[in-house]
Amino acid sequence: MGYFDQGGSNASAPQVDFSRLPRHVAIIMDGNGRWAKKRGLPRTAGHAAGAETFRTIATYCKEIGLEYLTVYAFSTENWKRSAEEVGAIMGLLKKYLLEAIAKMERDRVKMRFFGDLTPLSPELQKLCRQTEEISQRYEGCQVNICLNYGGRDEIVRAARAFALDCLAGRAEPEKLDPERFGAYLYSGGVPDPDLIIRPSGELRVSNFLLWQSAYSEYYFTDVLWPDFSKEELHRALAAYQRRSRRFGGVN
Ligand code: IPE
Ligand code: IPE
Ligand code: MG
């Protein structure tokens, strides 16, 4: 069950109007470790189950015609975990990318990576770049995978890139505004997320899309990511559609 306006009588049969879906949904894929622990399994088994859920949800988002899906797969802080756990996550990523490349012509999903990929293995970096390059020609659905991503890191990098452009005479400090600054972020060219979903019961942002979430709607649910289903996504979409977005104005 979710929080705030999310449950009630609509919880079991959420009414989603598929003609007015949000353009951009973002998900913090959290709760893999707890899912595994509940079953007496190693955390890595939770990550494997979470990767399956990602496949299911990403495919479904494309089916229903969502334009952008952004997922938080690995944060700049997740390196604090054991080498074994980090290694298992990277292994799952490699498996996913190899599959994605093999099935690209069938799936036709445009993919992008948000984050600093340089600490990843050269092999993984290459697979990420290859996935991005091959999929750039597809239209319709774009999946952004946040990998070694941190909202603060992203903003600092953007500030640094802008400062360098100023030094090189390519930009002027007086002309900087939120739109121009946004173009320096990993998400440059992608509209801000309309809806951000966080499963696993945590009520925090954990350094996800700090800049882009200025006016995003949040949906929190106790469901752990590996248990997240199409029905749960429907609940989030239905909750979103009941909200009144004002962006600081009145309606
Ligand atoms: C999310 O699940 C996956 C990553 C952060 C890589 P967790 O591994 O954080 O699962 P919990 O929060 O410990 O249950
Ligand atoms: C956020 O989850 C990062 C990802 C899901 C990739 P965490 O599990 O790392 O966040 P905290 O530690 O609970 O804030
Ligand atoms: Mg977690």
Image (cartoon, rainbow, N blue to C red):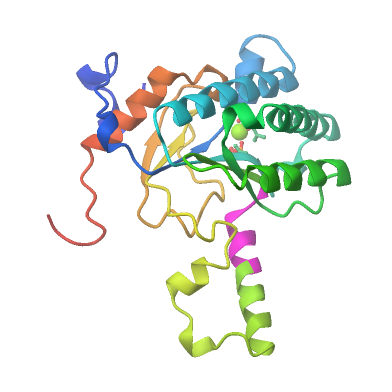
Q: Is residue 218 magenta?
A: no
Image location (x, y in percent) of residue 35: 60, 18
Q: Which stretch is magenta? A: 148-157
Residue lying at 64% horizontally and 60% vertically, measured from the top left: 153
Image location (x, y in percent) of residue 213: 43, 53
Q: In the displayed structure, would residue 123 be above or below residue 164?
A: above
Using the image as rendered, state which of residue 92 and residue 4 is in the foreground: 92
Residue lying at 43% horizontally and 41% vertically, measured from the top left: 67
Q: Which quadrant, please, contains the C terminus? A: bottom left
Q: Quadrant of residue 172?
A: bottom right
Image location (x, y in percent) of residue 80: 76, 43
Q: In the displayed structure, would residue 185 be above or below residue 45?
A: below
Residue lying at 66% horizontally and 74% vertically, measured from the top left: 161
The secondary structure that most of the magenta stretch takes on is helix
- The outermost residue toward the top is 39
Q: Quadrant of residue 218?
A: top left
Q: Is residue 231 left or right of residue 202?
A: left
Q: Which quadrant, please, contains the N terminus? A: top left
Residue lying at 87% horizontally and 46% vertically, measured from the top left: 122
Image location (x, y in percent) of residue 66: 41, 36
Using the image as rendered, state which of residue 223 and residue 120 is in the foreground: 120
Q: Is residue 236 left or right of residue 205?
A: left
Q: In the displayed structure, would residue 81 be above or below residue 180?
A: above
